Image (cartoon, helix red, strand yellow):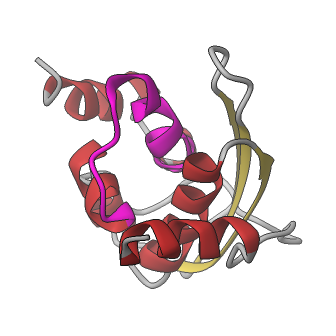
């Protein structure tokens, strides 16, 4: 077994940052309708206010809950570790290739959504908390790389 497969199984069996986060600034749930994977992300930012999230805010705490395949759950675990301490503006620049790098593998076409579900949720949550930004703007950037 390759080190990457071992790492995915480790994060799947022993997910990091798993659970609910009280007083989260952002709580967002995403579902992969094609396979049933679900993830709910809880984020607390360093300088968020009750009405808006500055792009310079950093992820202070992050947790997730969910059910799904090994790729989906491992990706959520790895992502939560990776983005802790990062600015919202940096996180919005992440894409599917960044997720593949975290996982250490390139997944097949049928598993791309599994690998990116947590990132989708995080980006959607950040955009909903930012003033004057719609969810679609971040996803235009995210999916343009598929063309």
Image position of 139 (left or right of 23) = left
Q: Is residue 17 left or right of residue 47?
A: right
User: Picture quarter containing residue 15?
Assistant: bottom right
Q: Is residue 122 magenta?
A: yes
How many numbered circles are shown?
A: 0
> What is the span of residues highlighted in magenta in the rendered image?
103-124
Q: Quadrant of residue 105?
A: bottom left
Q: Furthest residue to the front? A: 1
Please tell me in which quadrant of the rendered image residue 128 appears.
top right
**Nearer to the camera, 79 or 106:** 106
Residue drawn 16% across the image and 24% down it: 144
Task: Tell which of 47 and 70 is nearer to you.
Answer: 70
In the rendered image, the quadrant that contains the N terminus is: bottom left
Nearer to the camera, 123 or 76: 76
Q: Position of residue 125 (x, y in %)?
A: 57, 45
Rendered view: 131 above or below 76:
above
88 lies above or below 132: below
Q: Is residue 60 visible?
A: yes
Front one among 72 and 132:
72
């Amino acid at each position: 077994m390759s080190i990457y497969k071992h790492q995915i199984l480790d994060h799947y069996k022993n997910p990091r940052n798993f659970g609910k986060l009280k007083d989260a600034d952002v709580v967002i749930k995403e579902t992969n309708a094609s396979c049933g994977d679900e993830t709910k992300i809880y984020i607390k930012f360093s300088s968020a206010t009750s009405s808006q999230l500055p792009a310079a805010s950093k992820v202070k705490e992050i947790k997730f809950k969910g059910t799904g395949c090994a790729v989906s759950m491992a990706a959520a675990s790895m992502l939560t570790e990776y983005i802790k301490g990062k600015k919202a503006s940096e996180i919005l620049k992440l894409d599917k290739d960044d997720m593949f790098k975290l996982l250490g593998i390139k997944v097949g076409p049928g598993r791309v959504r599994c690998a990116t579900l947590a990132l989708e949720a995080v980006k959607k949550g950040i955009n909903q908390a930012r003033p004057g930004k719609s969810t679609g703007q971040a996803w235009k950037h995210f999916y343009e790389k598929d063309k």
